[in-house]
Amino acid sequence: MPDAPMSPPLTQNVQDETGRQPLPCGSWPSRVTADLVAGKTLALSEVSADGDHVYWLERRPSEKGRTVLMRWGQKMGVQEVLPLEYDVATRVHEYGGGAYAVRHGQVAFSDKRTGGLWFLSTGASVPVQVAGAEGLRYADLRFDSSAHTLLAVREDHRAAGEAKAALVAVSVPRDQQTASLEHVLYTGPDFLSSPALSPDGQHLAWVEWDHPNMPWDATRLCLADVVRNDQGQIHGLVNHRILAGKQTPESVLEPRWTEEGHLYVVSDRGGVWTVWQVNWQADANNPESESARLTACAMPEGEIGQPAWVFGQRSYQPLPGGIILVLAVREGVTQCLSVTNTGQTTIFSAHPDQCPVPLSDGRFAWLEAPPDALPTVVVGSVLAGVETVVRRSAELTLDAADISRPETIRFPVEKNGPPLGHAFFYPPANSRFCVPEGEQPPMIVLVHGGPTARAQEGLSFKVQWWTSRGFAVLDVNYGGSTGFGRDWRERLKKNWGVVDVQDCIAACQHMVTTGRIDPQRIAIRGSSAGGMTVLVSLASSPLFAAGVSLYGVTDLRALAAETHKFEARYLDGLIGPWPEAESVYVARSPLSVAQRIRAPVLLLQGMDDKVVPPGQAYAMADALKEVGTPCTLHEFPGEGHGFRQEATIRQAFTEELAFYGRIFGFQPAADPNGTLSAS
């Protein structure tokens, strides 16, 4: 297919009232450079506290995606904790999380390259391996109160068949002569997470679930008494009981203890995830006691909780005196609140990405992720907000007019159906250029992955890259997205490839009626599960003039047969039981509707992807080419499910921009040198 003719540049120098120069959309020079998106921005995550020290992880694309453990103190400043050869990450459930723990200056971590569990004692510079062998993985690490035992979720891949989950206790060495020992405390359920030790060290709570459920479908909250040896190290559990989730399916997540010995948990038994107090001392032998064992806390409106794709998430934080910090999602927007036991709320004057964690001096540490600035690790307070910036993801100089801010969009999704759908709309934004008179901007529809995730309002370069070049962006929270309650989440049950597609089309049609975008230049892009929605949407509606799928699902049968343990039965809920519902799997697969796709498609695929193997991209490219649909497949060696390397990210964004230029008829501007430096 020949390239579309390029729109000629405007020759008249007619500025708008702000002094910006009109220029065809898509061709605007942008300060959001490929270097900024790919290599100079650190991916910050998992902020934690140890006394008055702050710890966090940062993934560095410039180091081939290596994840580094960092530490900050008021006197010592910022330090890298571990030697260069360590990569702090885990592949438990394939998505990882909870890969490190700190207590009293001691550090335990999972090393991605070896899979082993490592320990760094206070004042030491070289860690020692305390557990691990070929085929073993560790996550959700927690120290006990004495810091001489480490609790973890272990995933064992040594035998054929599915990996086995276990709660384990690893004794950490007190000196160079002390050997480490690993004890299996509990095994049996298909999945385990969130080991939470009571402050007196006598009780362990955790979450478990079994196939075919996902953790947002049905889990169980469990409790057992801890058995210790003569040295005080944990080596067993007794008196196991189920506190919630045994009789009625509910999603219970994130058990946490207070200093006073109260146990809290997140549950959606009331229709939305929110915080409940657990009466864990109730009669475990009374089958009727389960319904009364959880007492709803006085919480603000909104959903408090997140889908447990990764370990180590924090949606709330109990504090002394009955106060609880929460992250509440309302109308798609996250707000951090301090809540008393009577329900009185104080707004946290910040934009935390995860619930803030307390420091010993009364302040808090958190990852600040506002809609108009880059993420930063910060220290501050409830009322004052950010007081100290500890670490920036990058040092960036952008005019406020260069940043597009999200607008909440509500749109009808079904006649006489559920509440209105939700999306964030980002108009084009550039301090130097504007949309010419008589032109409407092209729009890119973003389809988040999961599909049980959500569009979020924090500053994202996958949005700003486009808006700063003259695109509008629509980020859709289709049915199945979290943050809107269980009913909205379950609209996708048995309807993946139907409801998500219908909602994206409905959101798009709504924006067309507003007259704010060019209805002839709408593209849709998504990764992983979102990539499947992209391809089916292209086959279902002529609204979309182009589509981009990043490591997207194309064959649901192959996904059901080839995917890893965590998602092995996920499709039972989204599509139907496998293989009994094979005909539905075939009908819903993008490969089955490839002949209906006429818009050009760009496929971007990692060659080492174990979640959606490259074969799915190959098959889709062949099917599209067979019916004459323009399709480009770009393969990236060394990349898995989600691109990590600087060169890959830069090339993927640059190639996608050029793809839209060919389809929509504009010449992308040359990418100038970046305007930032790593902090």
Image (spheres, rainbow, N blue to C red):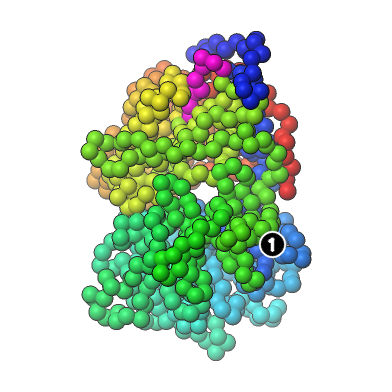
Front-most of 524 and 395?
395
Q: Which residue is mark 1?
A: 71
Q: Is residue 49 left or right of residue 439?
A: right
* Local SS, label 1: strand
Residue 668 occupies quadrant:
top right
Q: Is residue 307 left or right of residue 213?
A: right
One can see residue 127 in this view:
yes
Q: Position of residue 423 (x, y in %)?
A: 42, 38
Stretch in magenta = 436-444
At label 1, counting other C-alpha atoms closer than 10 Å, the crowd grade (few under 14, some 14-19, many 20 or more) is many
Front-most of 94 and 482?
482
Chief secondary structure of the magenta portion: loop
Q: Residue at x 31, y 74 (%)?
A: 293
Q: Is residue 490 left or right of residue 179?
A: left
Q: Is residue 329 left or right of residue 499?
A: right
Q: Is residue 345 above or below residue 239?
A: above
